[in-house]
Image (cartoon, helix red, strand yellow):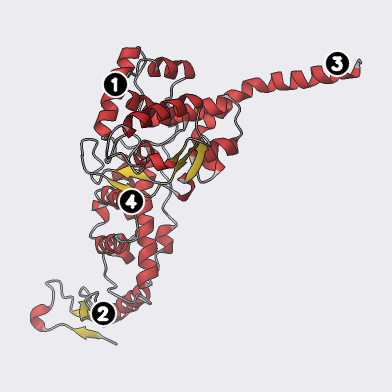
Amino acid sequence: MSVRKLKENKITKDGRSWVFIQYSKGLDGKRHQYQSKAYMTENEAIQAEKEYLNKYKDVEVNPHMTFKEAYTIYYEYQKDKIKDSTLKTYRDRIKYMGLLDNVELVNLDWDLYQKWRAQINKTNLCDRYKTDIQKFIKQVINFAEKQWDFNLRKFYNKLEPFKTPGALKKEMDFYEPEEFFKFISVVDDLRYKCFFELLYYCGLRRSEARGLQWKHIDFKNKLLTVSQQVLNPSNSNASTEWYISSTKTEASNRTIPIATTLLNDLAELKKSNERIAKFKQTWFVLGDDVPMATGRMYFYRDKYAEKAGVRRIRLHDFRHSCASALISGSAPITAVSNFLGHSETTETLETYTHMFKKDLANVPKFFDTLEKDFNEKSSE
């Protein structure tokens, strides 16, 4: 037992004179001492020590580790294991952790969690983004349990997705086919014409289109392979720095057919590039030895939308426009999922569920046709 009485000059003004002392190994490998607050009686100190030992039992290192200390170590641990883009996501999440920073891991509880949720709810962030922020807390907790044997399941299980009562899901924006054709008809720069067509006809993400190299285009078999993406370290559209990264997910690696219009435009673009003496198959389709700058993409999107007299949509909405066209064309859900590079068909259904609902209007017509065909065959 490590309960002891304080020296006369250490006794509190209200007469509390009993404490307990515990020792633990810190992250630096050295032995660290922890002294409890003072208690009025020896029995109170003994009981407090029992509760302390129960709370911190099985923790291998630094039982007083704070949440900030844990996520700082977690971030460093992940540096050589995940993409730079994911590390940036971590940094973006950390700025919302302030209320939890100086809290010891073992003191994370329901009341504190509710205060944190209330603080996050004061922001203008959507429920999905707030839930994504919360995922970072879960990752740190899982790491702390695995690395140092903290038992934080009770707190972990209290973390619930954010869901604002009565909130309506933001409608997805996209071009109807006639809007896209009107837009693309005024694009007079072949490189940007290919860019917008890659987004629409192939459903590529902006980063995937930037990462496309000529070696990824199979003109003979009319196929395009997505195996990488190009990102900016700062995630800023104005940044001139870039790097090649693996695709967003393993399922994003895909080989898809190329529409004839796009194939012809790509062939023409390649022919013009081949006139340049230094041309290589490793050149970027939308650039040369360096990829297209993101800032120019937005500039030309705005320019051509205004010129065509159509509304401006996000670059990512060209991908949604592709999905809309496929669904409207009655493409099987598995085909849509594979074409877009989704990991599961459930992801496709969850993302584009409102588009599939439009097909419900055709169900009565479908059954009417079946009945008509049956009646005609029966009367023969």
Could you tell which of marks 3 and 2 lies nearer the N-terminus?
2
| Kind of residue sitting beneath label 3 | Glu
The crowd level at tag 1 (other Cα within 10 Å; few <14, some 14-19, many 20+) is some
Q: In percent of the image, x 31 and y 23: which residue is there? A: 301
Could you tell which of marks 1 and 4 lies nearer the N-terminus?
4
Residue pointed to by mark 2: 25
The tag on residue 376 is: 3
Residue pointed to by mark 4: 86
| Kind of residue sitting beneath label 4 | Thr
Q: CA distance from mark 1 to mark 4?
A: 29 Å
When the figure is inspected, residue 132 is found, relative to residue 6, above or below; the finding is above
Q: Secondary structure at mark 2?
A: strand
| Kind of residue sitting beneath label 1 | Asp
Q: Secondary structure at mark 1?
A: helix
Q: 34 or 170, which is in the foreground? A: 170
Which tag is nearer the camera, tag 1 or tag 4? Answer: 1
- The spot of residue 365 in percent (x, y) is 70, 18
When the figure is inspected, residue 158 is found, relative to residue 277, above or below; the finding is below
Q: CA distance from mark 1 to mark 2?
A: 60 Å
Residue pointed to by mark 1: 302
Could you tell which of marks 2 and 4 lies nearer the N-terminus?
2
- The spot of residue 331 in percent (x, y) is 60, 30
